[in-house]
Amino acid sequence: MTHSIAIIGASGYTGAELIRLIATHPGFEIKALAANSKAGQPLAAVFPHLRHLTLPDLVTWEQIDFDQIDLCFCALPHKTSQEVIAQLPASVKIVDLSADFRLRDPEAYAKWYGNPHSAPEMQKEAVYGLTEFYRDEISGARLVAGTGCNAATGQYILRPLIGAGVIDLDEIILDLQCGVSGAGRSLKENLLHAELSEGTNAYAVGGTHRHLGEFDQEFSAIAGRPVQIQFTPHLGPFNRGILATCYVKGDAATVHETLAKAYGSEPFVEVLPMGETPSTHHVRGSNFCHIGVTGDRISGRTIVVAALDNLTKGSSGQAIQNANLMLGQPETAGLMLAPCFP
Amino acid sequence: MTHSIAIIGASGYTGAELIRLIATHPGFEIKALAANSKAGQPLAAVFPHLRHLTLPDLVTWEQIDFDQIDLCFCALPHKTSQEVIAQLPASVKIVDLSADFRLRDPEAYAKWYGNPHSAPEMQKEAVYGLTEFYRDEISGARLVAGTGCNAATGQYILRPLIGAGVIDLDEIILDLQCGVSGAGRSLKENLLHAELSEGTNAYAVGGTHRHLGEFDQEFSAIAGRPVQIQFTPHLGPFNRGILATCYVKGDAATVHETLAKAYGSEPFVEVLPMGETPSTHHVRGSNFCHIGVTGDRISGRTIVVAALDNLTKGSSGQAIQNANLMLGQPETAGLMLAPCFP
Amino acid sequence: MTHSIAIIGASGYTGAELIRLIATHPGFEIKALAANSKAGQPLAAVFPHLRHLTLPDLVTWEQIDFDQIDLCFCALPHKTSQEVIAQLPASVKIVDLSADFRLRDPEAYAKWYGNPHSAPEMQKEAVYGLTEFYRDEISGARLVAGTGCNAATGQYILRPLIGAGVIDLDEIILDLQCGVSGAGRSLKENLLHAELSEGTNAYAVGGTHRHLGEFDQEFSAIAGRPVQIQFTPHLGPFNRGILATCYVKGDAATVHETLAKAYGSEPFVEVLPMGETPSTHHVRGSNFCHIGVTGDRISGRTIVVAALDNLTKGSSGQAIQNANLMLGQPETAGLMLAPCFP
Amino acid sequence: MTHSIAIIGASGYTGAELIRLIATHPGFEIKALAANSKAGQPLAAVFPHLRHLTLPDLVTWEQIDFDQIDLCFCALPHKTSQEVIAQLPASVKIVDLSADFRLRDPEAYAKWYGNPHSAPEMQKEAVYGLTEFYRDEISGARLVAGTGCNAATGQYILRPLIGAGVIDLDEIILDLQCGVSGAGRSLKENLLHAELSEGTNAYAVGGTHRHLGEFDQEFSAIAGRPVQIQFTPHLGPFNRGILATCYVKGDAATVHETLAKAYGSEPFVEVLPMGETPSTHHVRGSNFCHIGVTGDRISGRTIVVAALDNLTKGSSGQAIQNANLMLGQPETAGLMLAPCFP
């Protein structure tokens, strides 16, 4: 059976990635593409790499006839997203890729995003979209909140370890490099090729990155007590990919065993043999996440490294994985594309 | 129906690209992977990005049981390729990705490649693999010779124009930039990141690049008289993609019309509206070729720019397109992956 | 003797490059830095890589006390530049890096830049700043107009050849790749890392690039009759560097000899041995221009390739070379920095 | 006064960087360049970016007339370096850029480098070359051992903090990204552009990187008791630059104050205002090191980020800084080149 899909926010990178993946999805058909600032244009004017596809022209989201839509992906900036989603008909299932429904607590949202939430009642309804850990709730949900891309990466490392109680909860450091597409298609000086290529820098140092809101919420819930991690993102001169290097206190073999067991039957999360280290090169353009575990020369210290593609597993691939569950499609439908290397 | 596939030369980039594409091909199953220098290893040791696939371990090509193979892709270096192919059983269809069977004339081969051909009788049998122009012969062939990646790009521009007699045959300049994967996975100083990134240079200047052998053969055959073009390749600091900028003498509107007509029903070759210019960014990782035509301010001069991915449309995607024809699969099977942007 | 220098437009890339070079110039001292949109800020807030220098804070250009300034570099956008320069006191020597005084003919300026010139009388006074060819005029000038970076590259190849009458004037094709810093520090979608890295494209195809105004003016003057060339720039995924590949009709040995003779005593222009090819990697960050000549397999055709750094030899290095002449400094003062490789 | 310089190992990246810097050094003149595998060639054949310099051709190191040499830079691989240096006449001062004389303890050398030291008596004589901390010893030394590039970066952060006793010695994590030139000009698959660009990975995870030998030696000496840190390097897709992100337990203001005081009068080490973060972009091609300090949201945790150019401040620039001291030149001679941005 083919499901009818709409995408709101089709002119950004996560929108483009959704279309790229749906292009070869056997069970989804795109019926509407909205991008209010580009309404009236053919998609190929905004994303020439998709010109081979037969797709509807861009419209405003208000122009979409939602009666014919089974599921709507919402790839808008936060704040705008909650305003739009609050106006969508109840008959439409929604996967939101923004930050607007990730935090269940309106105060936490206000703290991290700087504005009060305008649809707090929907926050309660939303299911957090980290598929491997919320599969049942996602299958029955009307509104799924896609996770932050960094937040997804860190959680793939830490959720099983916190859940199994095999690491020190007060001594977790997550050091991470993110490719530039994670910042979206926005005109900022630091995203120019001339500024960003050929080097790297840290940003949001000291515990100020918004994805910490997700870490705090999820890790504290798993642990049953407040958990705060240290988290430093870096901006790397590559377009796709997140590499997270996580320092924990715990036994390396136990950490590896815990992760291997947690993901043993997962189609998209691969735990490498002990001592091997993943690379973003090897997940590029795919929905896979690779995780490697290595013990340190200092006894009781372990380093866990995870790699995924921020646009795919960290965002649009995850969104489709969730949509598959919500619509009764096979979970892996449209997502088995192999990474693009070199 | 599913066909059984072998790949010889699976440890190089074109081998990896074949596997990437076959991974989601509905009608092909990989039964054997050969890489003599890496025999005995799992493929994931050589290409960790393919670790999610269930594949046979690498063997030597001599270890392959060809009785169970319908078609064999041969992704070996030239010279080695002809030696191996000459020993394969007649029951196996072959798509060769090397240069060994591209030139029908043994003397031309010896001139461009510096060694006499060791299987000249097979040269006669081989069909030149530029799918759009040799479709019928390829469908019935046992041995198809994949084209050079630069040679494919130049021919997509020039074959229809030469065939239609709309450009001056003695005034053709093909200026081209090729991504580094075109040079293969070889340990050469000029292919190191530190040497190649952040800049560009021309190479094989002055009519010495081997792909000129293909241009000479094909263009002269179409024109019915000797045709020689000027061709300058450049090595660009990107991994995938060829951008060819071709200077011809002829009327721009006629050139555009000729190309639009030639490719009107082709699934993979897109002629852009007059005056638009393609980009390698927009074909990356895909089997598509984009072509743009612009008239010059000097009357009677026209610039045609073409973009494709050297590893896909220029090599492994083309090989699969040909294999589809040879095995009775739909020509586009496994090849409709959308480009990976950004 | 130390000369006092002001820079107007210090917050752009050519401004930064001027400061980088003057930082180790033995005869220049920066007395004022203007950037009207950033006035009041320390330079390090705009260009942290220059934080080790003791420099005046940014001011508006109107705040500069020109009585203490010997020479002012003007690195503003075109149109703004002419308006500002027209207001500067006559006692100040000026090197303009914009396009505003490159074209002597107000009509040509209006045609290529889309607006009438507001200081046409100063256009007459301005000396065209291609140092090697206007040395005497520059030495005595009050206002020198820096050339376009692409225009400089093409002229290093073609001026001696046109002047010596050794190539066909109606069959010149200049195919060129330019690094992204050539587009300045402007917030445009196509200059984002995610859009520009990992690929390439042509732009201003068909004879529409503004630097053709300079080519037309200069080449026609040298030839004594109208000369129009074909010129196609490409945007490459690197920050610094121009590689120009020029196709001419003429004898390769004669072309090489003509260029070698023209630049034999030049400190910054190096003609490589016949058949060698330059690379932008080898001039990066320096004021050098490398030129290589190769004959084609087609008799009578020659390819000339030139490489320079668009920010240095193509712009700010050239500007300082000219300022040296205007102030009686050694021409090479501050400019002998070796290229930064890798 | 001009000193006569020889460079052994001139065909590698650190050799090239030495020549680049000496090219504009007012007090050094290169009298001999050795590269045994390339002896007989002009340097421009190996490094075309230095072709504008008038330099002696490459020779074997045995061919150098050391009577006319004041100081010799030795940029050989470790193990080879100790063998060569042991044979140099006592009259020649030596700055070694290899790892051979960094570790004072022969057993520590054997452990980290896998072979016994062949000149252990010279190990005792060698002075560790981190200029800012060994200035007096370096000034009087005959043999100075340049530090590892990662080792330098980590020490700029940690030496003052360990010395002042303001951080927990058992809880230090150094997470670091290094540009590819740090791996030298070696033909390894993982250093190819196609393998390394567009992504990142960790390596030597778990306390196995050789530069830990230097950290252990130096930090333990400062602390007066054994200190072991955790250290994870990553390979980034850029040519020059190291960014070290260091997690310590200590008060942020105290950490900042300690570093600011330690480097207050240093010409090349800049401590940024509290809360600012450095970038490798801003030190590229220069001898500067930028250090930034930020407190974490978790009380008592501090993040210190440092950036330098591995080839300059991390290697060849440091070597020249030391040579300046050894020869009585001003310490900053030849080293004030501004970073090359963009």
Image (tube, coloured by chain):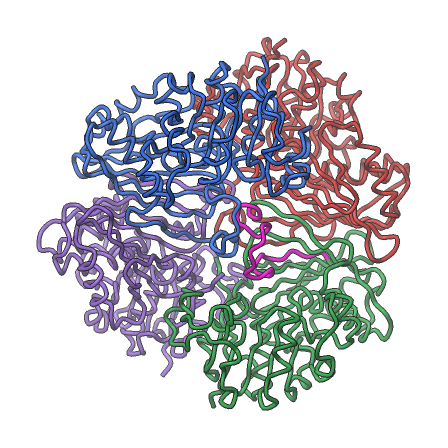
Chain colours: A purple, B green, C red, D blue
| Image coordinates for residue A74, horizontal then vertical, percent | 34, 62
**Residue in front for this viewpoint, B312 or B61:** B61
Q: Which residue is drawn at 49% across and 89% down?
A: B68
| Image coordinates for residue B151, horizontal then vertical, percent | 69, 67
Quarter of the rendering containing residue A264: bottom left
Q: Residue at x 80, y 20 (%)?
A: C136
Give the residue furthest to the left: A224
**Residue in front for this viewpoint, C5 or D139:** D139
Q: Is residue B122 among what the camera can see? A: yes
Quarter of the rendering containing residue D4: top right
Q: Is residue B244 above or below residue D45?
A: below
- The answer to whether residue A293 is left or right of residue B251 is left
- The answer to whether residue B52 is left or right of residue B10 is left
- The answer to whether residue B298 is left or right of residue A280 is right
| Image coordinates for residue A155, horizontal then vertical, percent | 24, 57
The verdict on residue A160 being magenta is: no
The verdict on residue B189 being magenta is: yes
| Image coordinates for residue A40, horizontal then vertical, percent | 50, 62
**Residue in front for this viewpoint, A163 or C30:** A163
Q: In this view, does C252 lie above or below C72?
A: below
- The answer to whether residue A67 is left or right of residue C178 is left
Please identify the quadrant where the N terminus of chain D is shown. top right
Q: In this view, does A20 lie above or below A330?
A: above
Q: Is residue C114 among what the camera can see? A: no
Q: What stretch is highlighted in magenta?
A: B175-197
**Residue in front for this viewpoint, B298 or B47:** B47
